[in-house]
Image (cartoon, grey):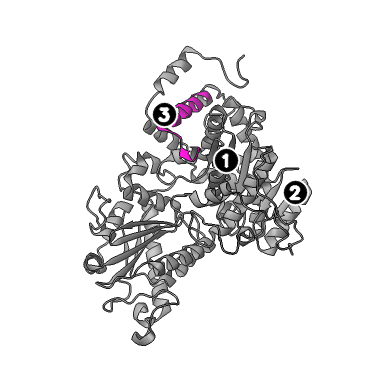
């Protein structure tokens, strides 16, 4: 019997199908033509008051793709949203459940190096063969079912969401961990009607042009994934957004629980070991424990962890999630979790790369704490200067001045700015092509960020900020905030550069001292700069170079692509 919504095969459609049997790169290039442009974002904002407009469109695409809403009900889904930490929470959760011998699906965004990363089976990106097969199968089916009343193809993220559902159903996963794209209520993943459990990580201000300009409005958007009778868990939140979540849960008759902190699950002498660094990952791990345990309980699994005696009570008029003894499988899952580009460290001889895709004020604050601690714990050089470099970019409508102000406390020698492009020419880098903004716009944004950085440095003090905050020679070992004293005074505004692509920025920073980084072309600064030559000398002579890459997951992804070519294979 032919599936509803799918037209019978015709000679023409078969011809198109044969023509589309091409390489993965062909699939990725075709996918990139669906990238959301500014006009579509405006449409989303206009439809914001009517969630059905977007959800109905997604349902229509689903039916045209050959699936019904009822088909999604067969997937045992864990649905997770939040402003920060939702990806890490998903990674912890998926790794725990995979340890139970379950076949896991994982849908996340954005990707770092290859778009295949967004759809994972058992923790690994789907193979190029599977990606190509499912992409063209879905693309051709949508082409075949178009008519005069509909647009043939959904935008980029909706297409990939549809593709993920097809992959998980066809590959028969035992469960699917699904990360919300933006928000929750209007997100296309919210066509899921019957998740097993939902989670909301830490809330903050982000994507205000789509989600609203207050944390209460954003909380309402995130709470839009609640479903009647489906248990949901959240971490500690400020009072006002927590009240919004409570009201939504009450109206939908969704049982909502507050997660106890991770220390409630730890033995006094045996703290839990996490595969992801940073104190901020502890709340993500605590949420993941609850999501994994709830899923196991709902499926009748026996090894879910014995309950502990009450550890504390909630003062937020919200039921407290259970405190239990994590099973050995749960502990191992937390320890083995990997999530590239989030508090990740790569040590390469004299160079140490600190990679964190933080892009909100709160996540930058957490990233700064992690970086400072990591650098403090690193053995300090005794045979030459230590140099600290910031590599930064930010996208969208974010307040980059606020982000850069937080980063100034790390006392960088140099701040380097570049677009999220691995090369000026994007030929051969289809996974990281972006058609939504022009190169001129990206470079202009980088120059604005550089000006903000220089202005912040000038505002801090009328003197060289490095010298003004240097500790006295007799002050002994450094135990407070991390400070860096250069070997000689440098003029103000001479410590920042702009490059036209990531490759050129990395070439200048590494000065040929990273044995794994092979720059494909010579580095050229966007503008000549007095620091370029003197900085190169200092970097070549430094016994230790600490580089923090932050501000954008796409920037981190581009850096990873160049520093670790195996990720592109």
Residue appearing at x 45%, y 29% in the figure: 130
Q: Quadrant of the N terminus?
A: top right
In the displayed structure image, the side of residue 51 where residue 525 appears, left or right: left
Q: Residues within 10 Å of mark 2 (few under 14, many from 20)?
A: some
Q: Quadrant of the C terminus?
A: top left
* Nearest the eye: 452 or 139: 139
* Nearest the eye: 84 or 207: 84
Q: Position of residue 225 (x, y in %)?
A: 66, 45
The numbered mark at residue 156 is none
Q: Residues within 10 Å of mark 3 (few under 14, many from 20)?
A: few
Circle 2 SS class: loop
Q: Is residue 401 visible?
A: no
Magenta-colored stretch includes residue 69? no
Circle 3 SS class: helix
Q: Earlier in the sequence, mark 2 or mark 1?
A: 1
Which of pointers 1 and 3 indicates the residue nearer the eye? 1
Q: Earlier in the sequence, mark 1 or mark 3?
A: 1
Find disc 1 in the rendering and name its residue.
100
Find disc 2 in the rendering and name its residue.
255
Q: Position of residue 446 (x, y in %)?
A: 38, 59
Magenta-colored stretch includes residue 128? yes
Mark 2 to mark 1 CA distance (whole Å): 26 Å
Find disc 3 in the rendering and name its residue.
129
Q: Which residues are magenta?
A: 122-141
Residue placed furthest toward the front: 269
Answer above or below: position of 127 versus 368.
above
């Amino acid at each position: 019997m032919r599936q509803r919504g799918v037209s019978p095969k015709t000679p023409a459609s078969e011809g198109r199908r044969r023509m589309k049997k091409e390489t993965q790169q062909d699939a990725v290039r075709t996918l990139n033509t669906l990238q959301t442009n500014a006009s579509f974002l405006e449409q989303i904002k206009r439809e914001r008051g009517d969630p059905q407009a977007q959800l109905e469109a997604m349902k229509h695409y689903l039916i045209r793709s050959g699936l019904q809403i009822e088909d999604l009900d067969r997937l045992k889904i864990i649905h997770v949203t939040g402003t920060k930490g939702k990806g890490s929470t998903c990674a912890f959760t998926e790794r725990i459940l995979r340890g139970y011998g379950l076949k896991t699906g994982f849908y996340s965004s954005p990707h770092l190096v290859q778009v295949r990363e967004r759809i994972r089976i058992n923790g690994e990106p789907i193979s190029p063969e599977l990606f190509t097969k499912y992409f063209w199968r879905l693309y051709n089916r949508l082409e075949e079912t178009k008519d005069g009343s509909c647009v043939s193809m959904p935008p980029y993220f909706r297409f990939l969401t549809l593709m993920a559902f097809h992959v998980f159903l066809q590959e028969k996963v035992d469960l699917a961990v699904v990360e919300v794209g933006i928000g929750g209520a209007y997100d296309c993943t919210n066509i899921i009607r019957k998740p097993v459990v939902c989670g909301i990580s830490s809330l903050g201000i982000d994507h205000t042009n789509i989600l609203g300009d207050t944390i209460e409005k954003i909380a309402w958007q995130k709470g839009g994934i609640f479903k009647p009778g489906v248990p949901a868990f959240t971490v500690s939140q400020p009072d006002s957004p927590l009240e919004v979540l409570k009201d939504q849960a009450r109206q939908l008759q969704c049982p909502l629980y507050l997660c106890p902190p991770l220390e409630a699950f730890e033995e006094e002498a045996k703290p839990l070991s996490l595969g992801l660094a940073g104190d901020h990952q502890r709340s993500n791990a605590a949420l993941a424990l609850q999501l994994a345990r709830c899923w196991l309980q709902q499926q009748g699994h026996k090894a879910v962890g014995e309950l502990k005696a009450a550890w504390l009570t909630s003062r937020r008029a919200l039921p407290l999630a259970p405190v239990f003894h994590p099973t050995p499988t749960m502990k191992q899952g937390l320890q083995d979790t990997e999530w590239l580009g989030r508090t990740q460290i790569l040590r390469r001889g004299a160079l140490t790369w600190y990679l964190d895709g933080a892009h909100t004020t709160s996540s930058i604050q957490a990233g700064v704490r992690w970086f400072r601690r990591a650098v403090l714990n690193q053995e300090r050089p005794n045979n030459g200067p230590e140099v600290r470099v910031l590599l930064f970019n930010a996208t969208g409508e974010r307040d980059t001045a606020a982000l850069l102000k937080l980063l100034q406390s790390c006392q960088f020698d140099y701040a380097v700015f570049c677009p999220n492009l691995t090369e000026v020419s994007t030929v051969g880098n289809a996974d990281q092509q972006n058609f939504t903004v022009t190169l001129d716009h990206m470079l202009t944004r980088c120059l604005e960020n550089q000006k903000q950085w220089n202005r912040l440095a000038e505002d801090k003090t009328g003197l060289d900020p490095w010298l003004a905050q240097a500790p006295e020679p007799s002050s002994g070992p450094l135990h407070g905030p991390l400070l860096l004293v250069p070997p000689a005074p440098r003029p103000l505004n001479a410590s920042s550069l702009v490059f036209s692509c990531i490759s050129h920025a990395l070439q200048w920073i590494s000065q040929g001292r990273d044995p794994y980084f092979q720059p494909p072309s010579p580095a050229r600064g966007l503008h000549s700069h007095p620091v370029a030559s003197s900085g190169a000398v200092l970097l070549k002579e430094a016994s230790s170079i600490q580089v923090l890459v932050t501000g954008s997951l796409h920037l981190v992804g581009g850096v990873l692509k160049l520093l670790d070519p195996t990720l592109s294979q």
